[in-house]
Amino acid sequence: MRLVETPQRAFLFVVLALTCAAQSGNPRGAAKDDLRKRLVAAAVERTHHTVRYDPAYVQIAYPGGDVPANTGVCTDEVIRSYRALGIDLQKEVHEDMLRNFSAYTRKRNWLLAKPDTNIDHRRVPNLMIFFRRKGETLPISNRADDYQPGELVTWDLGGGVPHIGIVVDRKGPSGRFEVVHNIGQGPQMEDVLFNWQITGHYRYYGPSL
């Protein structure tokens, strides 16, 4: 028997479709929200560690390699925070550089003939390129509300010196969200969002989102 299409039947199908969509929600969006929350928690946890600022080149294992736990620079706090979520920026950056090395040497040439798993992921300019390629690039503005917990911000400290930090969910005296970063005194959570010229604003969810 063939079902006869009627306006009532068509309306019912629309209602059922909308109901199913509402019930299913947006699992991908929920996963991204959850990852940002976990990144914030991991970044805040980093502030309980004592880390001596040390930018020295160190040979490390691959993948999952790290400089000694009591040393590091600004990028190492980002790397360690993501590692707490099971995301290895050393591996992800290296694999992208193997496939697209020219994209990383176009503006900032480190005089390398090939990628280097010991240092490439620990350089802010490389992370900026990687986040633009594999994450979400967000607007740069002077509005504090445009910067939300779980997002990454890069700065020029002056004279072309790059820096990076993670926006977290704690607010400082200015009313802005604070940033976890290491600018010389180990991982700190500070109200410094607009202290320097912002050069990048990103979200990164790892290779699976």
Image (cartoon, rainbow, N blue to C red):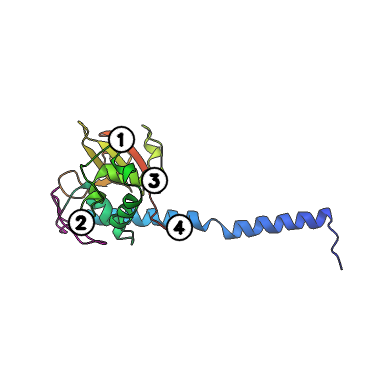
* Label 3 to label 2: alpha-carbon separation: 32 Å
- Residue 125 rendering spot, x and y as whole percentages: 27, 41
Whether residues under marks 1 and 2 lie with C-beta atoms below 8 angstroms apart, the answer is no
In the image: residue 5, left or right of residue 44: right
Q: Which residue is mark 4?
A: 31
The residue located at (78%, 55%) in the rendering is 10
Q: Could you tell which of marks 2 and 4 lies nearer the N-terminus?
A: 4
Range shown magenta: 48-71
| Vertical placement of residue 144 versus 78, above or below | above
Mark 3 vs mark 2: give the one in front: 3
Q: Nearer the viewer, mark 1 or mark 2?
A: 1
- Between circles 3 and 1, the one closer to the viewer is 3
Quarter of the image with the N terminus is bottom right
Q: Residue at x 33, y 62 (%)?
A: 86
In three-dimensional space, the C-alpha distance between marks 1 and 2, rounded to whole angstroms, equals 26 Å
Give how far across and how far down residue 102 sits, in percent: 32, 43
Residue on which the image places disc 2: 48
Residue 183 sits in quarter: top left
State the residue at coordinates (45%, 57%): 31
Between discs 3 and 2, the one toward the N terminus: 2
Q: Which mark is residue 133?
A: 3
Left or right: residue 205 versus residue 184 is right
Mostly what secondary structure, the magenta segment?
loop
Q: Nearer the viewer, mark 2 or mark 4?
A: 4
Q: Which residue is labeled 1 in the image?
A: 198
Mark 3 crowdedness (10 Å alpha carbons): few <14, some 14-19, many ≥20 = few
Q: Earlier in the sequence, mark 1 or mark 4?
A: 4
The quadrant of the picture occupied by the C terminus is: bottom left
Give the spatial CA distance, label 2 vs label 4.
27 Å
